[in-house]
């Protein structure tokens, strides 16, 4: 292939989109390294402290798109302190100063300030896409700067962010001429929105395909938006509440019938149940339905909706759907590939609405299922074995029993055999989260059979250090290991320290690792950042080696200890 001109090789490389494949290409020879370096436009950085912006842009000088992650994944479960770090500004400041032609920016669990957003708006003339997921630190003033100054903006996607809302006037700041907007999502905003400005924006955005509204957008405005934008493919509904005497329901049904391109539906933060039949006309073409933020839709109404969704490939719902509803999913949604069932009551005060019975029904009826997140009150080994047999194509399997140490509901035995069946049958499994009563035996299964596993999350599991060692020694492709409330200590941490150089990160909280073990790891592996997070203030940095560390975060880095660590984060 090296006999071809460089331009031909570069053209071939453009068809390779996977970051891992691009990395592999760059290792073939010096020529391919050089061509790949200058032709890579999209870069993924899984930890903003693993590398500096200087090194990223020296390696990929023509990069146009950056995906950057900050806080560890367990921040989603409030285990990482709010002020731990993950600041965006140094990256934006460097790119602005060096005139990087940035067009797309995707951020997850980052601290994003208004200064950062204003600098983006002022520095990157061709900026087109901003996606923020689980970020914090900014206000709608920063969004206003993006809207007003990014003239080629195609996508503004705000998911699960903590945003301080300054009266909702940011929506006024989009250009008054026709916009290039294709996707707009502000469903996570809690404050009011300028409804007239929103309607005008939709009217002058002929290319708009995806729109997700927040709870402040009433049904009347929603109807007028539908009339102006029947071309929408993805729709997030805000408030679905109306006056019983209003005629809006018939108008809404008529408007939705004209949305022939609709393929994704979400939202419904508030509902009037008598209005729900209006969405039935679009259900038959849906491939994605997210009702995980719709607590006011009861199980019987969910069943009516799902019976109309024969082409569904992705379904997110609350557990109020019940086992009965999941059986309807199994009967109706034969194309289903991804299912997420979230808890209506995450504290488990009320009786669980879904059990192993509903999961077995879905696995038996939806044979294309390959991705699962399932919150439930109980599980059995028999059910997991059946799921593994019926659906061997899982790449993501996450099971969360709300009582995390609960055994097999039928036999009162550990759930080792059930999860063992999952890792043995699902050869392509890349992500696994487990809960329930689990012993070292399940980790032996994982280390022996989960050859493609990249991310493992466990809690309240195992008997001894041997459990963690089974995983570290057996899972050759493991990239992220997250452990909480498990009996793993220094022996497991230090037995095979070179493994951590092949991984992105290790998180351990409420385990049995000591300060002495952490110091030893840092001394043995200087290219790792070994961070002890002492947010509780219980530890003495210069004290006894036998002090038990409550939170430990270990990650590989090319740039050494970070310079913005707060006082309670100690890099050893």
Image: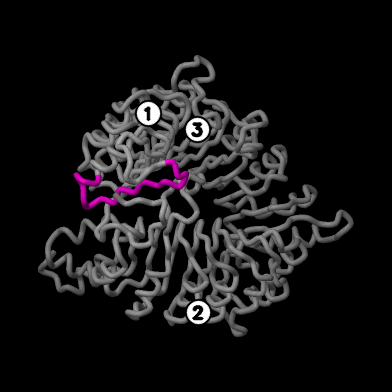
Boundaries of the magenta span: 522-538
Mark 3 burial class by Cα count in 10 Å: few <14, some 14-19, many 20+:
many
**Which residue occupies 89% across, 56% down?**
245
Residue 532 percent across, percent down from the top left: 36, 46
- Where is 481 relative to 196, above or below? above
The residues tagged by marks 2 and 1 sit, at their Cα atoms, a distance apart of 51 Å
Q: Is residue 529 magenta?
A: yes
Residue 291 percent across, percent down from the top left: 63, 48
**Which residue occupies 60% across, 43% down?**
317
- Where is 318 relative to 231, above or below? above
The first of marks 2 and 1 along the sequence is: 2
Check residue 200 in the rendering and tell me which mark sits there, or answer none.
Answer: none
Residue picked out by circle 1: 487
Tally the marks.
3
Q: Nearer the viewer, mark 3 or mark 2?
A: 2
Residue picked out by circle 3: 363
The first of marks 3 and 1 along the sequence is: 3
**357 or 506: nearer the viewer:** 506
Residue picked out by circle 2: 150
The residues tagged by marks 3 and 2 sit, at their Cα atoms, a distance apart of 46 Å
Residue 402 percent across, percent down from the top left: 55, 32
């Amino acid at each position: 292939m090296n006999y071809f001109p460089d331009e031909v090789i570069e053209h071939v490389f453009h068809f390779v989109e996977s970051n891992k494949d691009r990395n592999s290409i760059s290792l073939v020879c010096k020529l391919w390294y050089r061509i790949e370096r200058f032709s890579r436009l999209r870069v993924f950085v899984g930890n903003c402290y693993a590398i500096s912006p200087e090194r990223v842009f020296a390696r990929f000088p023509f990069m146009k798109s950056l995906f950057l992650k900050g806080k560890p994944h367990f921040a989603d479960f409030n285990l990482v302190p709010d002020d731990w770090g993950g600041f965006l500004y140094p990256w934006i400041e460097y790119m602005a100063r060096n005139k990087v032609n940035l067009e797309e920016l995707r951020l997850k669990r980052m601290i994003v300030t208004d200064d950062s957003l204003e600098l983006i708006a002022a520095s990157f003339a061709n900026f087109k896409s901003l996606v923020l997921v689980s970020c914090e630190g900014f206000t709608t003033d920063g969004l206003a700067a993006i809207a007003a100054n990014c003239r080629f903006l195609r996508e503004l996607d705000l998911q699960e962010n903590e945003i301080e809302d300054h009266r909702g006037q940011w929506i006024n700041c989009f250009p008054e001429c026709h916009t290039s907007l294709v996707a707009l999502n502000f469903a996570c905003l809690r404050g009011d929105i300028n409804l007239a400005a929103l309607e005008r924006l939709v009217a002058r955005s002929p290319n708009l395909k995806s729109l997700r509204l927040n709870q402040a957008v009433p049904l009347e405005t929603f109807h007028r938006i539908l009339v102006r934008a029947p071309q929408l493919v993805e729709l997030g509904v805000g408030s679905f509440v109306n006056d019983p005497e209003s005629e809006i329901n018939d108008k809404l049904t008529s408007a939705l019938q004209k949305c022939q391109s609709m393929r994704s539906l979400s939202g419904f933060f508030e509902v009037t149940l008598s209005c729900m039949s209006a969405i039935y006309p679009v259900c038959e073409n849906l491939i994605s339905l997210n009702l995980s933020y719709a607590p006011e839709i009861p199980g019987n109404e969910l069943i009516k909706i799902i019976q109309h969704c024969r082409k569904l490939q992705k379904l997110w719902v609350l557990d109020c759907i019940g086992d009965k509803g999941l059986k309807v999913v199994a009967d109706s949604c034969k194309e289903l590939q991804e299912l997420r069932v979230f808890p209506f009551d995450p504290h488990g005060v009320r009786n669980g609405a879904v059990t192993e019975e509903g999961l077995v029904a879905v696995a038996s009826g939806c044979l294309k299922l390959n991705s699962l997140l399932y919150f439930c009150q109980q599980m059995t080994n028999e059910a997991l074995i059946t799921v593994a047999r019926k659906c061997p194509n899982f790449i993501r399997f996450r099971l969360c029993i709300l009582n995390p140490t609960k055994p097999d509901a039928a036999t009162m035995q550990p759930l080792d055999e059930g999860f063992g069946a999952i890792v043995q049958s699902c050869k392509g499994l890349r992500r696994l989260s487990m809960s329930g009563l689990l012993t070292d035996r399940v980790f032996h299964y994982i280390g022996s059979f989960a050859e493609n596993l990249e991310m493992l999350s466990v809690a309240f599991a195992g008997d001894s250090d041997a459990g963690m060692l089974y995983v570290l020694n057996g899972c050759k492709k493991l990239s992220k290991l997250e452990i909480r409330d498990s009996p793993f200590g220094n022996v497991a941490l230090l037995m095979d320290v070179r493994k951590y150089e092949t991984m992105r990160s290790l998180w351990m909280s409420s385990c049995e690792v000591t300060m002495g073990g952490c110091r030893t790891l840092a001394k043995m592996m200087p290219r790792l950042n070994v961070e002890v997070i002492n947010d509780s203030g219980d530890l003495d940095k210069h004290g006894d080696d036998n002090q038990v560390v409550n939170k430990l975060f270990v990650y590989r880095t090319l740039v050494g200890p970070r310079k913005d660590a707060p006082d309670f984060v100690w890099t050893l």
